[in-house]
Amino acid sequence: MADAIVAEGLVKRYGSVVALDGLDLVVPEGTVMGLLGPNGAGKTTTVRVLTTLLEHDKGRATVAGLDVVADAKQLRSKIGLSGQYSAVDENLTGFENLDMVARLYHLGKQRSRERARELLERFDLVDAADRPVKGYSGGMRRRLDLAGALVAKPSVLFLDEPTTGLDPRSRLGMWDVIEELVAGGTTLLLTTQYLEEADRLADKIAVIDHGRVIALGTADELKAQVGGERLELSLGSAQDVAKAREVLGPLAIGEIVADERGHRLTVPVSGGAEVLVDGIRRLDAEAIKVLDIGLRRPTLDDVFLTLTGHAAEEKQGERGE
Amino acid sequence: MSTIVQALGDGAVVAKRNLIKIKRVPDLLVFSTLSPIMFVLLFAYVFGGSIEIPGMDYREFLMAGIFAQTVVFGATITGSGLADDIQKGVIDRFRSLPMARSAVLIGRTTSDLANNVIVIVVMSVTGLIVGWRIHSSFFEALAGFALLLLFAYALSWGMAIVGLMVRSPEVFNNASFIVIFPLTFIANTFVQESKLPGFLKTFAEWNPVSAVTQAARQLFGNTNPAFPPPDVWSLRHPVLMTLIWVAIFLAVFVPLATRQYRKAVSR
């Protein structure tokens, strides 16, 4: 199988801020790669370089066998991009938006109209087709934006945080649409801040931080690396936190994180509900007062904490996300 | 398909999109025509009594100036429109498409030209109502309007550069005000440049807005041969001077705007 996307040692600087710091990435044809990382990690910059919107400073990248700089113009007719903000024109109707995009892909007048109608049908926007986008809901806008990216039936599709800012129901709807798409064999590069999203949609996940890939694997492989679940406790006092830490030590499969001020304890464990029961027994035997205890699956924060030693939020607001 | 034909075709698609906006958000056009009407009335009735122009009625003198000022303001829509498109991510979408690099700018400047045409028609009617008359031939008058529009079109490309740089319509509007106001007021638009003090007089004499105003005045026959313009080359040959300015603007702004567009990305 050929590789649809190949990036080697991409570097992009904005002044003194390094947005990409030697990023390597390979996406085989017909697969879905999830680019997972917090704000400022370099996700959007990666997408912009690969979609010819931004020129990188160093390194090399090809998409669909074409160089993103030297063959930029040719490449643009083979890719589709749906950005973080729905890049649809509010004053145009849904139909006019898609018709315009099709015309700019040079599909011709007749074919453009047909394609616009086809896509409106497929994305369940027929009823709203002739209303200005201004009145669309967030979910409808995203669907229209995605439809715009598919106008030319691209072989490689880029979706930059396709569900950020959507309510849970619209998010699920969007996931269904994307799943259907990739079932058709489109190569997809998807960026997201949500582990859950990457887990559901991507064949492979590349975790990026500070502009480079720090971990690569399937969702299961990453979770195994992060280590099963988390036992989270809320305790009455700092002394209890210290005591609980000692008592639960044998259950931990990784480093226990204690927040003495907040009287909270996070213990990486594996084994599901049994471990929870075991933990409660041990705490009870030592008469440690537990205000709250729960078991949860690893989140992006846990992935980050494990892989980088810092939490995902630390880099909020950095340039070149 | 040759590159130029493609650029024009793509430009037409983008222009159509912008024109649909004028149709869907008519307030934009209403306000961009109301303010020149207000200017005509203000200057004709408030200042008209106190500003004396030797050899002619102030309203005759005024109209070419207001036309010039209005089309210059009309040209600023190019900048705020592009800034708005960047902010909304529409430019990102355009830039990811296999379209000509200059098409968005061609489309934008063309639709803004169309906007200026509508505004000029409305203003001409207002002018005729308050007593302005064209004393030249039909073709001369037509040439006058064409020159005004051409001047604004060339200036649009300059506004495009600023709009693409600042990336926010609010910032653009504030920034353009600082330039546009002195440019349209330190000129022969509303007063005779000869009445201005020292440095301002020289500035007004060579101000591109003065050239186009003087050219329109001549082509509309709103000048009095007994009172010729000052003996400055730019104002003695206003039509030629305007065309030179247009050529300079296009030669400088078109490549710069296209370059800026290539780099433009939303945050």
Image: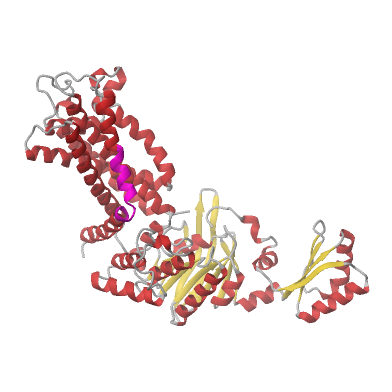
x then y, percent, for residue A146: 43, 69
Farthest right residue? Answer: A286
x then y, percent, for residue A33: 52, 73
Q: Main secondary structure of the magenta part?
A: helix
Q: Residue at x 20, y 24 (%)?
A: B58
Q: Quadrant of residue B5?
A: bottom left
Q: Is residue B51 above or below residue A18?
A: above
Between B145 and B150, the residue placed more toward the observer is B145
x then y, percent, for residue A229: 73, 74
Q: Is residue B211 above or below residue B84?
A: above
Judge from the rendering whether residue A155 lies leftward or rightward of residue B219; answer left or right.
right
Farthest left residue? Answer: B137
Whether the magenta-drawn stretch holds residue B181 is answered as no
Between A310 and A273, the residue placed more toward the observer is A273
So how many labels did they put on this image?
Answer: 0
Q: Residue at x 36, y 58 (%)?
A: A91
- The N terminus of chain B sits in image quarter: bottom left
Which residues lie in the magenta part? Answer: B21-35
Q: Residue at x 22, y 19 (%)?
A: B52
Whether the magenta-drawn stretch holds residue B24 is answered as yes
Judge from the rendering whether residue B151 lies leftward or rightward of residue A89; answer left or right.
left
Between A61 and A306, the residue placed more toward the observer is A306
Q: Is residue B58 visible to us here? A: yes
x then y, percent, for residue B244: 19, 36
